[in-house]
Image: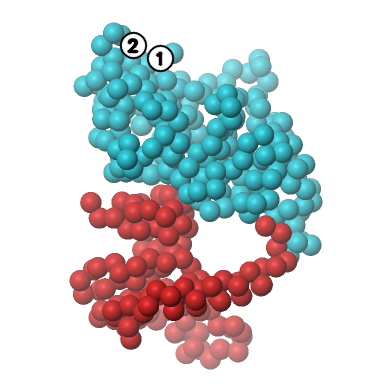
Amino acid sequence: MSEQTATWFNLYDARPEAEVPAESPLAWSYHRTGRPAVSQKSRVVLRERAMLGHLILRGGAIVLDEAVRQVLGFGLPGRPNTLTHDDGGERSIQWLSPDEWLVIVPGGEEFVLEGRLREALGDAHYAIVNVSGGQTLIEIEGEMARELLMKSTPYDVHPDAFPVGKGVTTVFAKANLILRRPGEERWELVLRRSFADYCYRWILDAGAAYTIGVES
Amino acid sequence: MFLIYCPYCEEHREEEEFHPKGQAHIARPADPEACSDKEWGDYLFFRDNPRGIHHELWVHAVGCRKFFNVTRNTVSYEILESYRVGEQPRFTAEHPEGRPVETVAAENVTAKAEVVERQEGVKA
C-alpha cells in the first residue's frame, strides 16, 4: 500500500492578506446579541480567542509523535482524552481519537507548521487538514465556570472526573464541541463556526445567573 | 443518565453520544461474484432478531467517531460488554454467563497479530 501513498500535496495559505478584513465567527453575535461588560460581580468571564491556527493530524501515533516532537518540541498525548501543552502554554495538542489529534497554535503559525510537519513526515501514511476557518475557541473562566458547564453538558465536569489536562469531544447544549480544561478555573470550548452564535447565546443565558461578562 | 462504555475513549459516556448501527460481525463474502442471489441477498438485507444476547455495532458519533461492538440483551436491554472491532465477545448465546477473560484475551491477541501482519505494508 505504501507505493500508493501520495508524495505530493497541495499546500496553500488559507489566511487572507492583511488588507482583507477577517472577522471572528462571533462578530455577528457581538453585533446582534451584544456583549455584557465584565464587572466586579462577574463570577464567570467569557473570552474568545479567535483566528488561532487549528490543524487536524491523522495517522499512526508513533510516526506522528516523532514528527511533532521534531517540529514543535513536545509530544502527542498518548492517553485517550488528554491534552499536552508547550512550555509557554500557547500551543497545544489534544487526543481526539486513536488516530486523530487536534493541534492549536497561535494564528498565522499553522501554515508554516503544516509545511514543516509534511516535510518531517515524508512519505509516511498520514493526513493533515487545516481547519482554522471552521472552528473557534472560547474560554470560560471563573469560580462559577464549572456550574455553567454543568447546566450545559451531560459530561461529568467534577474535578475528580475531569482533571486539569483533560479534553473531550462531547455534547454541549444539544450541539457538540470539544471541551478542555487547561487550568484549574479555566475551560476551553472548541466549537464549530456554524454553532458559534448558538453556543454563545446559550452560554450568555446560562451565565446570566452568575453575571457573566464578555472580555473583548 | 444511561452510560455506555467506549472501548476507544476508555471511559463511560452518555448515551446521547452514541448511535446504534445494527448487527455486528457481518462478514462480506470473499468473492461477491461467486455468490448466489440468495447468499448475496442474505448478506445485504437479512439480519438476526434474537431474543436474548445480541451483538451490535455502535458508533461513538459525538466523541472519537469510532465504531465498536456491544453485546446487549434484547430482553432486559442490559449492555453486557463493549469491545473493539476485530475482537471477540465474551458473552455469547452459548456462554450467557461469559467466557473466562483469559480465553478471550488470548484469542484477541492472536487476531490482532494477524491484522498487523496483513497491514505490514502500511507505514503507520
Q: Amino acid at mark 2?
A: Val
Label 1 crowd bin: few (<14), some (14–19), many (20+), radius 10 Å: few
Q: Looking at the image, is A141 positioned above or below residue B43?
A: above
Q: Which residue is mark 1?
A: A215
Marks 1 and 2 in Cβ contact (< 8 Å): yes
- Is residue A3 shown left or right of residue A128? right
- Tell me the tag on residue B78: none
Chain A is which colour? cyan
The chain coloured red in the image: B
Give the quadrant of residue B68: bottom left
| Amino acid tagged 1 | Glu
| Displayed quadrant of residue B90 | bottom left
Q: x and y percent of residue B34 in the render?
A: 60, 89
Q: Residue A110 location in percent, x, y?
A: 65, 31
Residue nearest the observer in this picture, A140 or A48? A140
Chain letter belonging to callout 2: A
Query: For the point 61% across and 40% down, which residue is it?
Result: A75
Q: Which residue is mark 2?
A: A38
Q: Are marks 1 and 2 on the same chain?
A: yes
Q: Is residue A125 above or below residue A50?
A: below
A106 relative to A143 in the view: left or right: right
Q: Position of residue A13 (x, y in %)?
A: 70, 31
Residue occupying the point 63% across, 18% down:
A20
Query: Which residue occupies the foreground of this view, B113 or A180?
Result: B113
